[in-house]
Image (cartoon, rainbow, N blue to C red):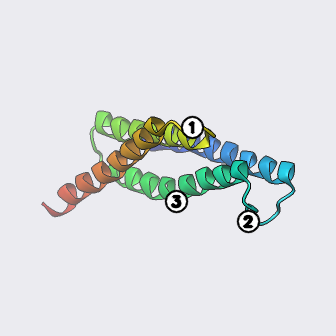
Amino acid sequence: MNIVILYASVLAILYVYLSFRTIFARRKHKVSLGDRGNPELIRAIGVHANFAEYTPLALLLLFFVEQKEAEMLVVHALCICLLLGRFSHAYGVSQSKENFLFRVTGMILTFTSILGSSIYLLIENFL
C-alpha cells in the first residue's frame, strides 16, 4: 500500500524543522549543551525530544498495521491521528503562552494512533 511512507516522510520533514529550530535557539543563546535555564531553549529541546520519543514507535506500529493489509481507511485514519497529533503538540508546546488545548489534543491524537495500532495488531495476530 505504501500509505505509511507518505506520512513518515511528512513527519520526517517536521522532525528536521524541529531540529533546526533547536539548533538556531542554541546558537542564538550561545548554549551548546543543556539549556542554561533559557525558556525558549527549554521549549525547543522539549518539543524536539517529545517528537523523537513518540514518533518512531508510532510509525513502526503503523508500518506493521499496513503490512497486515488493514483497510486503507484504517491506515489513513491512524496516520492522520499521528500527523495531526504531532503537529498540534509541537505547536502547543512551542508557544511561550501555551494553550494547553493544542498540547492535550496532540497527546490524545498521538495516543489514539499508538493504541489503535496496538489493538489492531493484537486482534489481527492473537484473536
* Nearer to me, 47 or 20: 47
Is residue 63 rendered to the left or right of residue 70?
right
Is residue 87 rendered to the left or right of residue 121?
right
* Nearer to me, 66 or 23: 23
Q: Amino acid at mark 1?
A: Tyr
* Nearer to me, 119 or 36: 36
Give the quarter of the figure containing the N terminus: top left
Q: Position of residue 33 (x, y in %)?
A: 78, 66
Q: Tell me which numbered mark, 3 or 2, is placed earlier along the sequence.
A: 2
Q: Residue shown at 30%/46% (left/top)?
A: 69
Quickly name the residue at label 2.
34
- Residue 53 got which mark? 3
Quickly name the residue at label 1.
91
Q: Amino acid at mark 3?
A: Glu
Cα distance between the residues tagged 2 and 1:
22 Å
Q: Residue shown at 39%/39% (left/top)?
A: 81
- Residue 78 got which mark? none
Q: Position of residue 24 (x, y in %)?
A: 80, 47
Is residue 90 rendered to the left or right of residue 21?
left
